[in-house]
Image (cartoon, rainbow, N blue to C red):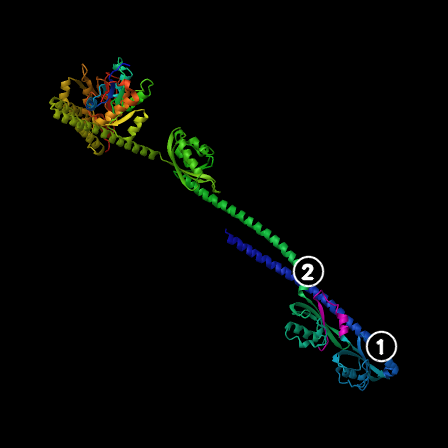
Amino acid sequence: MNYRYWLFSILVFLLIAFYIFISFYNDEKNNVIENSYRLQSIHAHQTSLSFQEMFEGWKSILNYLAADEDIIKMNELGKEELRFLYKNLRNELKSITRVGPDGKISFTVPYEEAIGIDISSQEHIKEIFNNKKTVISDVFLTVQSFYAIGIHVPVFRRNKFDGTIAFVLNFEKIAENFVRDLRIGKSGYVLLISRNGTELYCPQRKHIGNNIQKRIHDDPDFEAMIKKMLSGKQGTAVFFYDHATESYRKMHAFYMPIYLDGIYWSVAVITSEDELIAGLSNFRNKLMILIGIIFLGAVLLSYYAFKAWGLVKETKERKKVEAKFRALLSNSNDIFMLVDSSGFILYVSPAIEMLTGFGEIDIKDKPIDKFIHSDDLEEVMKVWKKLLNDENNIFRVEFRALKKDGDYMWLEAVGRNFLSDKHLNAVVVNIRDITQRRIKDEEIRQKNEEITRFIYIVSHDLKSPIITIRSFVDYMKENLKKNDFQRLSDDLIYIEKASEKMSCLIDDLTELSRLGRVSYKTEELILQEVINEALDILAGLIKDKNIDIKVTERPVLIYGARDKLIEVFQNLLENAIKFTSDCEHPHIEIGIEESDEIIIYINDNGIGIEPEYQNRLFGLFEKLHNDYEGTGLGLTIVKKIIEIHGGRIWIESEGLNKGTTVFFTLPRTKIRG
Amino acid sequence: MKKRNAVILLIEDDIAHAEIVKRSFEKAGFKIELIHLFDGKEGLDFIFKAGKYAENNIQPDIILLDIRLPRINGFEFLQKIKNDETFKVIPIVILSTSSNQSDIDKAFQLGANSYLIKPLSFDRYKEMFQNFTDYWIGENFFPQLQV
C-alpha cells in the first residue's frame, strides 16, 4: 500500500461526501424556495384582496353617487357635492368626472376646463356605454394629459342610461400605498402591472406608468413570466435580473392575477434567492465547518487505520521474510549474531550449536567477552570500541572462542554497527570458523620462520669460514713479508680447515634443500640390508675405533627410499661412533620395537647428553660439542628424511656419560608421495 | 689495587676466530690475559665457579661473546650474567658475524655493553678498548694498557 492509493481513496470519499452534501443542500434549498413561494403567494393574495377591497370601496361610493339625483342631473348641488368629495379624497383621486350619455364630459373636478370634451373614444368608455356595467380602465392617457385609472359606474335616469360617474385614480399613489411595504426581506419587492402591461408599481419609480413589454426583451425568463402574467395566469418563475437594484442575480417570483370588475391586473412577489436561502447559507456554512471537522477527523482516523493495516500486513510479510531468513541462517555455516551496545548477545543463529556446542539458549543475553579467550580479549575489545564509534565501516577481528567442551576454536568476526538503525538497533556480527585457516596460517608462519632462520643461520655459518680465510690470508701476507715460513704453514692449516668446513656445509645444505624438493622412489626393503649397507660404508671407522656393534636379527620389511635410509643409518652410526670414541668398551646396538609402527633405535654407551639439550639437537647447525667434527647439519638431515617417510625421531639419554639412544619410527605401509 | 694485566674472557666456538681475536690484541700491543672458552655452558661455569671451574678465582674484566654457541648460546649467557647482582658489572661485548638488526636489538635489551660485527678491523678493537679504559673500568684496572 502506498500513499497514492490512500490519497485516491481519500479523494473518492471526499467526492461522495461532497455529492451527498450538495444533494441534501439542494433539497433543503428547494424546500426553502418552495416555502418562500408559499409566502410570496400569501403576499400576492393579500395584495389582490386589498385591491379588490379598495375598488369595492370606490365602487360603493360611486354607486351611491350614481343614485344621487343631484349627480344624475348634475345640477349645482351635485357639482358642489363632487367638489367637496374631491377636496377630501384628493390624495387618492386625480379627478371625479361625470360623463354624459353623449360621451362628453358633463362635469369634472378639479379640471373643469375639460368639461364638454368628448371621451367616448376611450376604450373603457366604449365598454361601459355598451355594457352599462361598472368598468375599471386600464391605465390611460387622460384628456388632461396624465396617466390614470378610471372607475366608471353607469348612471341611470329613470332607468335610462345617462352616462357615467367616475373616479380617476392616482394609481401611482395607490399602488405605492398598497404595495410599497409588501416585500419579503430586504431584496424583495412587488411588481404590479395592469392588463395592458402598464407598470402600476415597480421599485424603480421611473418604470411606473411605462409599459413593461417595452423592457422585457433582453431577459427571456422575465419575458416569459410577464407574458403569463398578462394572460392572467398564476405561477412561479425564476429569472436572473434584479430590477430593484438593476443587477444580475437569481430571483424567485410568485405571480397571480388580481380580478377587478371584468378586468384583471397581475401582481408578482419577487425575492432574490440569496435572501431566501440566507438562513440556509448560514446553516450551510456552519454545516460545512462541521463536516470539515468530521472529515478531517475521518481523514486522520483513516490514516491511522491505514497505517495500522499496513503494519499488520508488514508484520505478516516480515514474518514470512523472517522465516525464510531463519531457514537460510540455520542452514548456513556462518553464524549471524546481533549484539547490543553493551556487548550482550541479542540473537544468534542456530548454526552456533554445530560450531561451538553451545545452544542458542546458552549464548543469548550473555556478554560476548564470556566466550572469548582471555589472550584475545584485549584485541577484540579494541576493535569493539572502534566499531561502536564508527557506523560506516566494517570491522574484522580474529580470536579464539570458547567451545562447550572447554576447548577453544579460532573464529573470525566481521561486525558492523547498526545501533542507530531503528529496525535493528544492534551490532550485526558475522562469525566464521577459521580454525583450519589458522592452522594453515600457523604452518606457513612456521615455514616462513624456518626459512628465515635457515637463511640467517646459513649466512652466519657460511660467513664464519670466510672471515677466517680472509683474516688468515692477511696474516699470511704479513708472514711472507717477514719470511716467517713456520707461521705461514700454521696459518695455512686454518685456511684449509675453514675451506673444508665450507665445502661440507655447502654439501649438507644442498642435500637438505634437495630433501624438501625432490621426491624419492619408495620400495619394499629389508631393514637389515639397509643397516648392513650403512655399516659397510663405515667399516673402516668401526674397525679403527674397535667398536662392538650388535644388530637385531629379526627380519623386518620397511618401505622407503633405499639410499636415504642408508644415509640415516650412516649418519646416526657416525654420531654414535663419534661420541663413543673416548669410551673404554665402545658398544652400539641397533634394535627394533614393534607396535603400530616400527620403532628403530640406535643405542650407544657414549658421552650422553644432558636432558636440557636433547631437544635442540635436531635444529639447524646445532652442535653440542665443539670438540667434535661436523657441520651441525647431520641430525637435521636425518630428521628431514624420517619426516619425509612419515616417521618421527627423538633422543633419549639419562645424562652425561650415560649413553644415548636415538629412536625413530617408520610406517608399516607404503606411504604416498 | 695491585696492578695487573687486564683479563679478557673470549667465548667463541670457532678456534680460528678465537685466534684472530688473540692476534688482534697482540698486534695492538695490549698486554692482556686472554681466556678462551668454547661455549656458553663453559662460560657460565667459569663465571659462577661451577663444574670443572669450581676452583676458578679469576673474574674477567671484559667478556667478548659470540652469539651462536653450542649448548648455551650467547644470548642465554648474556641474560644470566646481566641478571646476576655480582657479575652484571662485567662489560660484555658481543662479537658476531650477524649484522641482523633484531640480533643487535636483542643483545642490547639483554644488557650487552657493545656489539661488534665480525670481521673487525684493528682500529675498532682499539677504539673499543679505549672506551672501556676511559669510562667504564677506570685506569686502575688497566695500568699497563698501552698503545
Q: Which residue is mark 2?
A: A279
B38 relative position to A237: left or right: left
Residue sitting at the far bottom: A102
Whether residue A335 is in magenta: the answer is no
Q: Quadrant of the C terminus of chain A?
A: top left
Amino acid residing under circle 1: Leu
Image quarter of residue A265? bottom right
Q: Which residue is at a point 86% across and 81% down the rendered structure image?
A: A79
Q: Which residue is at a point 77% across and 85% down the rendered structure image?
A: A120
Disc number lying in front (1 or 2): 1
Image quarter of residue A47? bottom right
Helix, strand or loop at label 2? It is helix
Amino acid residing under circle 2: Gly
Q: Which residue is mark 1?
A: A85
Residue A668: where, in percent of width, then height?
A: 24, 27
Q: Is residue A166 visible?
A: no
Dot placed on the residue nearer the N-terminal end, 1 or 2 = 1
Q: What span is in magenta?
A: A172-196
Cα–Cα gap, marks 1 and 2? 49 Å
**The residue marked by circle 1 belongs to what chain?**
A
A525 relative position to A262: left or right: left
Q: Is residue A276 above or below residue B44?
A: below
